[in-house]
Amino acid sequence: MRFTRLRLNGFKSFVDPTELVIAEGLTGVVGPNGCGKSNLLEALRWVMGENRPSAMRGGGMEDVIFAGAATRPARNFAEVSLAIDNTDRLAPAGFNDRDTLDIVRRITRDAGSAYKTNGKDVRARDVQMLFADASTGAHSPALVRQGQISELINARPKARRRILEEAAGISGLYQRRHEAELK
Ligand code: ATP
Ligand code: MG
């Protein structure tokens, strides 16, 4: 599974539709302070199912919607889509029938988030599980936020264990056990 394209529309400072092509190899994003580099990485986390507003540097999830600027009114929704190359057929079962996976998350003011994979409505949990099983995802240790290295050094053992479990790709199993116990 390889991420190939990220599209943003109304997400944070990306008020106009914006596309980031992720070519094979290393991609660098450079620009002056405040131009939106961290917002791009947050868009990636968000489309993968991140549900903690604090991880988006906001007070509530609707804070990811473009809030308006001197010359532009605020938007009512934000949408991010992520295209994944699945020609290696490593996507988890249920998502593994195509060469390309397209994941879309959209949030509308007062109506919350909705997700689609390849045009079909899915639950947040489905998207979170897809990435948890693929050892990546919104909480993945492979996505290193600004300031996260020092957090990691100071983390308590339990928090550090969660990071290792996510890296090992077993965090989806905990969620499934928890759900099985509730049934
Ligand atoms: P640095 O180099 O300092 O790390 P950066 O390129 O990572 O900067 P970001 O933190 O991604 O920059 O972008 C911050 C900008 O995004 C700020 O100008 C902020 O006003 C804007 N921003 C964040 N949320 C929204 C929103 N909901 N609506 C409009 N603009 C937003
Ligand atoms: Mg930044």
Image (tube, grey):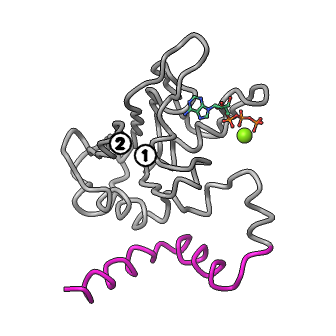
Q: How far apart are marks 1 and 2 (CA)?
A: 5 Å
**Residue at the image point whose x is 35% and y is 42% from the top:** 105
Nearer to the camera, 41 or 64 = 64
**If the image is split into quadrants, where does the C terminus sit?**
bottom left
Label 1: which residue? 47
Secondary structure beneath label 1: helix
The magenta region covers 154-183
Label 2: which residue? 105
Rendering coords of residue 181 (x, y %) = 27, 89
**Residue at the image point whose x is 56% and y is 44% from the top:** 42
User: Looking at the rendered structure, which numbered label has been put on residue 126?
Assistant: none
- Quadrant containing ligand 2 reads top right
Dominant SS of magenta comes to helix
Kind of residue indicated by mark 1: Val
Kind of residue indicated by mark 2: Arg
At label 2, counting other C-alpha atoms closer than 10 Å, the crowd grade (few under 14, some 14-19, many 20 or more) is many
Q: State left or right for residue 86 relative to residue 181.
A: right
Q: Is residue 43 above or below residue 49?
A: above
Rendering coords of residue 13 (x, y %) = 58, 27
Q: Is residue 182 magenta?
A: yes
Q: Does the magenta stretch include residue 106?
A: no
Q: Is residue 18 above or below residue 103?
A: above
At label 1, counting other C-alpha atoms closer than 10 Å, the crowd grade (few under 14, some 14-19, many 20 or more) is many
**Residue at the image point whose x is 29% and y is 42% from the top:** 111
Rendering coords of residue 123 (x, y %) = 26, 56
Secondary structure beneath label 2: strand
Q: Residue furthest top?
A: 71
Question: Residue 36 appears in which quarter of the rendering?
Answer: top right
